[in-house]
Amino acid sequence: MSTSNQASEVIFNNVGKMAIFKKNQTVILKNCSFTVEPGKLTVLIGPSGCGKTTIINLIAGYERPDLGSVKMDGQPISGPNWERLVVFQETALYPWLSCYENVMFGPLSRKVMAKEKAHEETLKLLAKVGLEDFRDKYPSQLSGGMQRRAELARALINQPKVMLMDEPFRGLDAMTRQLMQEYYLKLFEETHASHVFVTSELDEAIILADNLLIMTNKPSKIQKTIEVDLPRPREWSMVTSKRYLEIKAEALELLHEEAVKASTTSGKVDVDLSGLLQTADSD
């Protein structure tokens, strides 16, 4: 797969991240290291509450690591930036703007694109996500799947170097979810920006990913990276292929291991923080 000049590399180096939960300080990430390869679709999957959204927030610049480093193209991420955009679980469309106006909003408000150019790009993106006939509708007049498609278009018009997807299709019915996955795959395979996608659904993870990152229980790190070497463009017919089933079996075994570990420590609330300070690299 060719790489766009829009694609960026993100590197987590021995990242440690702590949080306060019910007045207890707990370690979310410990010695967490991995690389988001330029132009690749990196998918994170792991136990509930293991810190997947925390990783998204660190890349977006909403949070900073307590230890270690998060860098994009060699530079520390110090705060939010249009180069890294997030599509969340809940809709973030402006309810007072039409579908068309929502997509146009970013480049016009930033004054990085002439109005006529923004108009052209908006129409192209709305056509690609099947919303050209709904351009004048407001978010409340769109179905959940349509809102997700509008959000994809709104993010992509800004030409981010890294797209961050935090379980964006969660809560959609099965048919709508599969349709969204197909739209998303098509858009990714056309743009070739770097993408990080969080999901709890293994089939979704495999059909989307170039690299599948299996996370451990909290305090979390990457247990293993599985290269998903299925050909692109991806199609759902691949789920019956030998290679797909091999990848799924490997991932299921790793996730089962973490589920077993979680069941033996479910009553433990406090986490020892001393190990985090002893082993993390703070470069």
Image: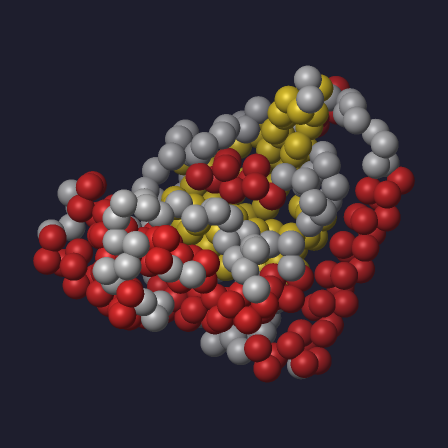
Number of numbered callouts drawn: 0
Q: Residue 103: tell me if it is visible.
A: no
| In the depicted structure, whether residue 150 falls above or below residue 186 | above
Q: Quadrant of residue 219?
A: top right
- Residue at horizontal 56%, vertical 55%? 170
Q: In the rendering, at what x and y percent does residue 260 appear?
A: 86, 48
For the residue pair 125 and 177, the one nearer the viewer reads as 177
Q: Quadrant of residue 145?
A: bottom left
For the residue pair 154 and 242, the one nearer the viewer reads as 154
Q: In the rendering, at what x and y percent does residue 149 appear?
A: 39, 61
| In the depicted structure, whether residue 36 falls above or below residue 15 | below
For the residue pair 204 and 18, the one nearer the viewer reads as 204
Residue 225 falls left or right of residue 85: right
| In the depicted structure, whether residue 23 falls above or below residue 43 | above
- Residue at horizontal 81%, vertical 55%? 256
Q: Quadrant of the N terminus?
A: bottom left
Residue 258 falls left or right of residue 231: right
Q: Quadrant of the C terminus?
A: top right
- Residue at horizontal 85%, vertical 32%? 267
- Residue at horizontal 57%, vertical 37%? 54
Q: In the rendering, at what x and y percent does residue 3 appear?
A: 39, 63
Which residue appears farthest toward the right when viewing the image? 264
For the residue pair 258 and 168, the one nearer the viewer reads as 168
Q: In the rendering, at what x and y percent does residue 89 appear?
A: 51, 48
Q: Quadrant of residue 142?
A: bottom left
